[in-house]
Image (spheres, rainbow, N blue to C red):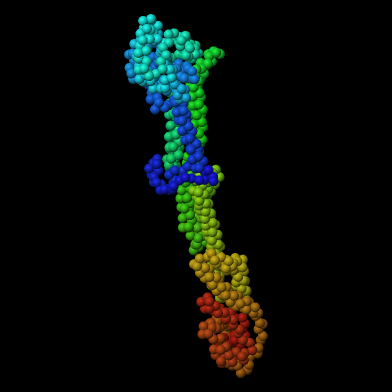
C-alpha cells in the first residue's frame, strides 16, 4: 500500500478550525501511513529520552525531590559533601568535614542535603551501601554524638559503615571513647572510631580521599556545585525539550486541515514558526550539553596522571548519553516534521487547486451558458453573419479561460504524479475541467458548422429570390410593340436566353443540393423557406420557358413576298377606291384589337365567325397572327402581325 495513499480520516462537513467558517467536506485529520509510522517512532524516541533521564537518576522526583539549584545555599555551607571517592566494593563515600556550626544546621536543611547527596550515585552504587566519614578531630564529643544521632535518625540511604575521626584533644577523645561505648547500641549502625588519618587509610584508599583527609583525590566544592547545577539544568532542558517536541508532535498529528487557502497558509506559518522555535531550543540544548561535556573532560586533560573519579565518570557518561538521545530525538522529530510539512504544503496546494478550480469552473459555466444561449439559426444572411461574428467573439473571449482550465488540469496531473495525498479529489476535477473544455469546443464547432451551412442556405435563397425578382421584372419590361417585329422578338429572345444562362452561372440549382445535403441540421423554418424559394424558382423558370418558346417561334417566322393578283370582275364595283393607300401600321391595330378580343374570349379567330373563316379560305393570301398568352404574368397578350395580302388591305380601305 502506498504510504501516502492510505489516509486515516473521516470526511465531515465541519467548520474550519482556524476561521470557523463552514465549508466543503474535508477530513478532520489526515495522516498517512508513513507519517503515522514516523510519528510513532518519534514518540518512542521521546519516551526513551525521558527513560534515559530516569535510568541516570537525573530527574527522579520520587528519589530526589530537590535540585541543586533549590538547595544551593545549603550546599555552599559544605557541612556534607560527595567527593566522588569510593570505598571497598565501590561504595560511595559521603564526607562530613569539620563544620563548627553543624549543630545549628536546621533539620530540614540537613535532610535535604543528605537526601540530595545520596540520590546522586547510581542505583547500583547506592545499593552497595554508603560509607560515611565524619571528621570531628577539632570538635567535641557532643558534636560527634549529635552528628551520629542525626545520621542514624535521618539518613535516607543504605549505610555500610560510619568512620569517625574522634576529637584529637585528649580529654575529648576519652569522653568520646566512653560515650561511644555507652551509646553504640542506640545508633544501630556500624561505627568505627578512628584516632588518625592513618587509621582511616586502613579502611579507605588514599586515592579515594580528598587532601583534607590525607588523600590525593582532586575535589573543588564550588566546581562540583557548578557541574551538578549544569548537569541538572541540561537534564531539565532535555526533558523539557522532549516534552515540548512530544506535545508538538501530537498536536501536528491531530491537526485538522483547514478547507480554505488563507487558513491553510496561517496554519502552515504557525507550525513552521513553532518548528523553528523548537529547532532553536534543540540547538541550544545540544550546545549546552556539548559545553558541559567539554568542562567535564577538561579536568582529565589537566595532567596525564589525573583521572576522573567515578562520579565524574558517571556525569560524563550521563551527558554523552543525553546528547546522543537528544540527537536521536532531533532526527526523529525532523523526519516526522518533514512528512507533516509535506502534508501541509500539499494541503495548501490542494486548497489553491480547489480555489482555482472553482473560479475556472464558474468562468467556463458562464461561457457555456453564453454559448448555449447563442442561436444557431438565423432568418437572413445578415442575422447569420451577425451570429457567426458573435460566436467568433465568444470563442476569442473564451480562449484565455479555456487555456487556463487546460493548464490547471495539467497542474492537477502534476500533483497526482507527485504522489499527492488527495489524488482521489484532484483526479475528478481534472476530468471535469477537460470535459467542460471539450464540450465548449465541440459545441462551438457544431454551432459554427450549423451557422456556416445556414449561411450558405440563406445566400442561396437570396440568390434565388433576387434572380426571380429580376426575371419577373425582365418579363414585365419586355414591351409588346417591340416583340411585333422579328428583330424585337429576337432581341427579347436573346434577353431571355441570357437571363436563363445567368441562372446556371449563379448556380441556383445548388440550393436544392444544399437543402438535401444539410437537411438533417436545418431547422423546420429554414426548410420551409428553402422549399418556398425552390417552388418560386420553378415557377419563374416555367414562365421563362414559355416566353422562350413563344419568342423563339415568333423569331423563326420569315416574311413571305407579296404576289400581285388581278381583282375579280364581279368584285371590282364593290370595292371603293381609296384615296389614300392604307398604311400597314394602321391596318394592323384593328386586327390586333380583334385578335386580342378573340383571345380574351378564349376562342381562336377562325372559330369565332364561320363566315369570316370561309372568306379567309377563299382569299389567295391571308393574314397570319401569332398570339402569346402569358397567364402566369397576369394574362397579358402580345400580338405580332407577320404578313398581309392586298385583298385584306383593299377590304380595310373599304
User: Of all residues shown, which one is farthest toward the top?
Assistant: 170
The residue at 40%/43% (across/down) is 16
* Residue situated in front as seen by the camera: 86 or 60: 86
Examine the rendered structure and indicate whether residue 189 appears above or below residue 414. above
In the image, residue 359 lies at what x, y percent?
46, 47
User: Of all residues shown, which one is farthest toward the bottom?
Assistant: 570
Could you say which quadrant of the image residue 562 lies in? bottom right
Examine the rendered structure and indicate whether residue 614 appears above or below residue 66. below
**How many numbered discs?**
0
Examine the rendered structure and indicate whether residue 308 appears above or below residue 336. above
Could you say which quadrant of the image residue 488 lies in? bottom right
452 sits to left or right of 134 = right
* Residue situated in front as seen by the camera: 405 or 219: 219
Could you say which quadrant of the image residue 557 lies in? bottom right
* Residue situated in front as seen by the camera: 35 or 515: 35
The residue at 63%/94% (across/down) is 569
In the image, residue 46 lies at what x, y percent?
47, 32
Res 560 visible: yes
The residue at 45%/30% (across/down) is 50
In the image, residue 464 lies at what x, y percent?
55, 67
* Residue situated in front as seen by the camera: 210 or 31: 210
In the image, residue 30 lies at what x, y percent?
46, 43
The residue at 41%/17% (across/down) is 190
Res 414 visible: no
Name the quadrant of the C terminus: bottom right
Amino acid at each position: 500500500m502506498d504510504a501516502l495513499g492510505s489516509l486515516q480520516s473521516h470526511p465531515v462537513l465541519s467548520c474550519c478550525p482556524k476561521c470557523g467558517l463552514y465549508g466543503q467536506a474535508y477530513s478532520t485529520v489526515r495522516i498517512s501511513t508513513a507519517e503515522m509510522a514516523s510519528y510513532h517512532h518519534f514518540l518512542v524516541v521521546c519516551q526513551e529520552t525521558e527513560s534515559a533521564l530516569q535510568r541516570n537518576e537525573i530527574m527522579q522526583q520520587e528519589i530526589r525531590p530537590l535540585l541543586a539549584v533549590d538547595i544551593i545555599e545549603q550546599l555552599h555551607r559544605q557541612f556534607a559533601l560527595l567527593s566522588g571517592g569510593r570505598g571497598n566494593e565501590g561504595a560511595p563515600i559521603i564526607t562530613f568535614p569539620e563544620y563548627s556550626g553543624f549543630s545549628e544546621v536546621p533539620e530540614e536543611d540537613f535532610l535535604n542535603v543528605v537526601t540530595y547527596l545520596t540520590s546522586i550515585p547510581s542505583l547500583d552504587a547506592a545499593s552497595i551501601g554508603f560509607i560515611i566519614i565524619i571528621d570531628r578531630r577539632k570538635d567535641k564529643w557532643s558534636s560527634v554524638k549529635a552528628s551520629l544521632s542525626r545520621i542514624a535518625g535521618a539518613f535516607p540511604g543504605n549505610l555500610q559503615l560510619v568512620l569517625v575521626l574522634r576529637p584529637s584533644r585528649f580529654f575529648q577523645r576519652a569522653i568520646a571513647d566512653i560515650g561511644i561505648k555507652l551509646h553504640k547500641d542506640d545508633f544501630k549502625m556500624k561505627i568505627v572510631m578512628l584516632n588518625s588519618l592513618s587509621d582511616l587509610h586502613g579502611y579507605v584508599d588514599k586515592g579515594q580521599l580528598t587532601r583534607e583527609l590525607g588523600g590525593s583525590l582532586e575535589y573543588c566544592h564550588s566546581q562540583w556545585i557548578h557541574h551538578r547545577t549544569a548537569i541538572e539544568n541540561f537534564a531539565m532542558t532535555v526533558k523539557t525539550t522532549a516534552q515540548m517536541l512530544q506535545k508538538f508532535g501530537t498536536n501536528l498529528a491531530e491537526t485538522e486541515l483547514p478547507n480554505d487557502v488563507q487558513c491553510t497558509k496561517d496554519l502552515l506559518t504557525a507550525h513552521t514558526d513553532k518548528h523553528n522555535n523548537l529547532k532553536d531550543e534543540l540547538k541550544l540544548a545540544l550546545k549546552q550539553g556539548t559545553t558541559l561535556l567539554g568542562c567535564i573532560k577538561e579536568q582529565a586533560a589537566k595532567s596525564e596522571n589525573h583521572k576522573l573519579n567515578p562520579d565524574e565518570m558517571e556525569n560524563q557518561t550521563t551527558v554523552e548519553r543525553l546528547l546522543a538521545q537528544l540527537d536521536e530525538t532531533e532526527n526523529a522529530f525532523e523526519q516526522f516534521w518533514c512528512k507533516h510539512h509535506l502534508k501541509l504544503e500539499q494541503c495548501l496546494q490542494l486548497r489553491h487547486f480547489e480555489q482555482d478550480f472553482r473560479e475556472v469552473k464558474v468562468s467556463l459555466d458562464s461561457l457555456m451558458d453564453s454559448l448555449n444561449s447563442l442561436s444557431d439559426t438565423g432568418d437572413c444572411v445578415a442575422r447569420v453573419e451577425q451570429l457567426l461574428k458573435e460566436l467568433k467573439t465568444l470563442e476569442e473571449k473564451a480562449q484565455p479561460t479555456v487555456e487556463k482550465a487546460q493548464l490547471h488540469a495539467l497542474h492537477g496531473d502534476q500533483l497526482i504524479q507527485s504522489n499527492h495525498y488527495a489524488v482521489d479529489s484532484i483526479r475528478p476535477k481534472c476530468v471535469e475541467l477537460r470535459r467542460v473544455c471539450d464540450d465548449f469546443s465541440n459545441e462551438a464547432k457544431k454551432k459554427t458548422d450549423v451557422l456556416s451551412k445556414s449561411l450558405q442556405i440563406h445566400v442561396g435563397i437570396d440568390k434565388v429570390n433576387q434572380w426571380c425578382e429580376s426575371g419577373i421584372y425582365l418579363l414585365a419590361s419586355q414591351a409588346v410593340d417591340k416583340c411585333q417585329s422579328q428583330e424585337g422578338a429576337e432581341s427579347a429572345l436573346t434577353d431571355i436566353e441570357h437571363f436563363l444562362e445567368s441562372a446556371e452561372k449563379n448556380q441556383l440549382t445548388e440550393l436544392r443540393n444544399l437543402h438535401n445535403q444539410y437537411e438533417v441540421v436545418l431547422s423546420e423554418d429554414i426548410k420551409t423557406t428553402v422549399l418556398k424559394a425552390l417552388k418560386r424558382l420553378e415557377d419563374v423558370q416555367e414562365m421563362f420557358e414559355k416566353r422562350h418558346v413563344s419568342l423563339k417561334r415568333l423569331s423563326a417566322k420569315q416574311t413571305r413576298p407579296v404576289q400581285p393578283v388581278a381583282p375579280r370582275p364581279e368584285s371590282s364595283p364593290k370595292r371603293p377606291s381609296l384615296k389614300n393607300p392604307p398604311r400597314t401600321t394602321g391596318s394592323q391595330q384593328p386586327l390586333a384589337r380583334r385578335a386580342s378580343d378573340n383571345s380574351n374570349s378564349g376562342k381562336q379567330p377562325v372559330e369565332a365567325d364561320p363566315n369570316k373563316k370561309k372568306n379567309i379560305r377563299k382569299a389567295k393570301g391571308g393574314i397570319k397572327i401569332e398570339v402569346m398568352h402569358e397567364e402566369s404574368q397576369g394574362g397579358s397578350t402580345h400580338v405580332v402581325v407577320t404578313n398581309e395580302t392586298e385583298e385584306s388591305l383593299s377590304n380595310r380601305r373599304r
